[in-house]
Image (cartoon, helix red, strand yellow):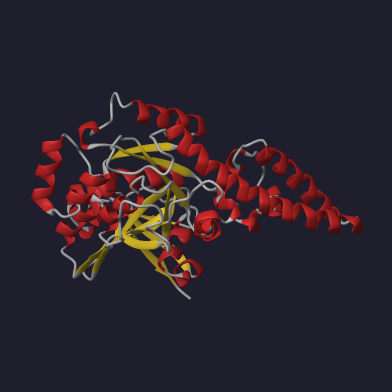
Amino acid sequence: MNLKCGIVGLPNVGKSSLFNALSNAGAEAANFPFCTIDPNVGIVPVPDERLDKLTELVRPQRTIPATIEFVDIAGLVKGASEGKGKGNAFLSHIREVDIIVHVVRCFADDDVIHVEGGIDPLRDIQIIDAELLFKDLESIEKRLDKLRKQSKTNDKTVKQHLDIVQRLHEHVENGKPVRSFMYTTEEAQAFSDLFLLTQKPVMYVTNVSEEDLPDAAGNTYVDKVREIAESQHSGVVVVCAKIEAEIAELDGEEKKMFLEELGIKSAGLDLLIRAAYTELGLITYFTAGEKEVRAWTIRRGFKAPQAAGVIHTDFERGFIRAETIKYDDYIMVGSEAAAKEAGKMRSEGKDYVVHDGDVMHFRFNV
């Protein structure tokens, strides 16, 4: 399952600096607006200590972590929904992501220009939110016009869709995002193909100074972002993009020592990915053998055949059973053979709901 995160925000809030730190992809970062025009894309391995421990036990030929894709979308400005600052192109990139990572500047620095002239997280968030809402409103109004014309045929389904889209239009026109609109799965068919921007989940990344790490206690800018996030049931991650760039250059013990010196338990990358997994309801299961130990990302609630399908569609189509070991049990006994001997390996059928950390082997026939 390919998870794609779109990094958005006003120009010069630290998006590209954060992207560079996260992905080491070398995205250009400079102190002027519209440094990023085409979206930069970085594929990042998901840090997971469980994968490392399984690798130590199994000693496979190779280890493959789960990955997450970060898309650095150019800074939006007022009027982006009307095409200002190449806004239409930028907004179209957001349609393709699973979750919006909204970077908000929460530090003051006279040497770093702010496109709006000063630091105000509430204003910055409102600017981005407004542009996304305006773009959604445009898409919804086009759909409304189409449905009104079609409704003249007295088609029952068309009339139902018209009623739903009219309610959605009123909701968005009142400044509320699509994700807070109450609708059933069946009703969603009336607008699901519009790929509305404010329907996507959002998490906030507050970019702070080094002095404000690890939790930005006392930073009033971050406090404002947390209030907004809480009202939207969204997550907040505190990072210092400048420090993350330094962390990204370190490996192993050096990285651990540097984090300890700063009083930080985890790098911003780890925190950001964990938060993204939580927001999207994702978990990880593992496959482990002599050739390969690998982490797989699935949605929470997936049953065994669906989880198998993430590896290959044939696995789901011809699913017979899943031989499953709980991660803690695997680590405790030390191997698949030992788990089987200790009665820790279970044979699960089609209705088994996969748990985070399960070590699985699928039996199938096509």
Task: Name which residue lies at 51% across and 59% down.
Answer: 86
* Residue 345 seen by the camera: no
Q: Position of residue 152 (x, y in %)?
A: 90, 56
* Count of all numbered marks drawn on residues in the image: 0
Q: Position of residue 198 (x, y in %)?
A: 56, 46
Task: Identify which residue, 146 or 333, lies in the foreground.
Answer: 146
Which residue is the extreme one toward the top? Answer: 218
Task: Identify which residue, 63 or 150, lies in the foreground.
Answer: 150
Which residue is the extreme one toward the right? Answer: 153
* Residue 177 seen by the camera: yes
Is 68 drawn above or below residue 212 in the view shown? below
Task: Identify which residue, 37 or 339, lies in the foreground.
Answer: 37
Task: Name which residue lies at 47% across and 43% down.
Answer: 202
Which residue is the extreme one toward the bottom? Answer: 366
Q: Position of residue 305 (x, y in %)?
A: 47, 61
Residue 207 as seen in the image, left or right of residue 146: left
Q: Position of residue 88 (x, y in %)?
A: 56, 58
Quick one: quadrant of the N terminus? bottom left
Task: Identify which residue, 248 or 300, lies in the foreground.
Answer: 248
Residue 321 as seen in the image, left or right of residue 293: right
Task: Name which residue lies at 35% across and 50% down.
Answer: 15
Is 270 drawn above or below residue 34 in the view shown? above
